[in-house]
Image: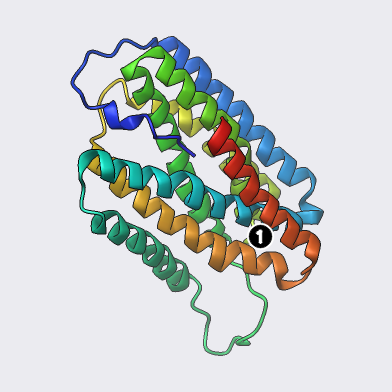
Amino acid sequence: MVNTRVCGTLNSGSTPDGHPMTAILLSIATFISTSLGGLFSIKYKDRLHLIMGFTAGVLLGVVSFDIFPEIIEQIKIHNFDSVYPMIALVAGFLLFHILEKSMMIHHSHEDEYADHKHPHVGKFSALALAGHSFMDGVGIGLGFQVNTAVGIAVALAVIAHDFTDGMNTVTLMLTSKNTVKNAKWFLLLDAVTPTLGVLSTFLFKVSDNFLVLYLGFFAGFLLYIGASDILPEAHSKHSSMKTVALTIFGALLVFILTRFI
């Protein structure tokens, strides 16, 4: 998750004065954080329903306590029309819904209620999360274009959240019946992309308009995979109050991180 509350000042036209090497080193820390989160999910895959319950709470928290407040803040600062990020949110939700369901059409002779999982759905989801991790890196790089202090603040927020990003990637892969080997490859991709995002910001800047639309679109995507995929799967075979408690804890943890980190 990118803590973008500092991004409203990114396009002031000032000369970047952050230190590129510091940005790259901090992006390597995101690699470590993401990798540890994914390996944690692999080690405890026999308790994946509990991890999924926690992950669903994290995604809810990300949307509610990180992305929505940032959208509101950017709308206030730049006097944007609030309907456009909401259109982007609906588009993100519906696009992933359409793509997922179009890939999951069953043959007419399959049992309607059979328990089928499709590996390509998990791969698509993991790729989408890798795209988000790339934007995490973009957030770090643009923070350093403001100044070193802002860049470090953004990087610390990303590092704190990337542990759960790694968990999310592995969880989506394993619940879609991908192999552990494939899950590790996609975890590696997710862990590397923040560094690539940082490097990309040496070449361009992102406008405030794009940032707000991106945040809305990604919020819709997170809402879909959290509410329609991960949470129902967490309770499909192992529903318990422990799973519910972990969902609440996941949302609460993100609230704490976004308020105090």
x, y (%) of residue 19? 39, 9
x, y (%) of residue 44? 79, 48
Locate the C terminus by quadrant. Answer: top right
Q: Residue at x 20, y 44 (%)?
A: 79
Q: Which residue is mark 1?
A: 175
Front residue of this view, candidates 35 and 1: 1
x, y (%) of residue 33? 62, 30
Q: Is residue 82 left or right of residue 22?
A: left
Against 226, is 35 above or below?
above
Count of number-bearing discs: 1
Badge 1 density bin: few <14, some 14–19, many ≥20, Cα 10 Å: many
Q: Residue at x 44, y 42 (%)?
A: 132
x, y (%) of residue 66? 47, 44
Front residue of this view, candidates 9 and 51: 9
Front residue of this view, candidates 197 and 219: 219
Against 97, is 33 above or below?
above
Residue extending furthest toward the bottom:
109
Q: Is residue 252 left or right of residue 221?
A: right
Q: In terms of image quadrants, where is residue 210?
A: top left
Q: How is the image coloured?
A: rainbow
Front residue of this view, candidates 251 and 187: 251
Q: Residue at x 48, y 42 (%)?
A: 130
Q: Is residue 182 left or right of residue 68?
A: right
The kind of residue on which mark 1 rests is: Thr
Q: Residue at x 23, y 13 (%)?
A: 15
Q: Is residue 177 visible?
A: no
Q: Is residue 196 visible?
A: yes
Secondary structure of residue under mark 1: helix
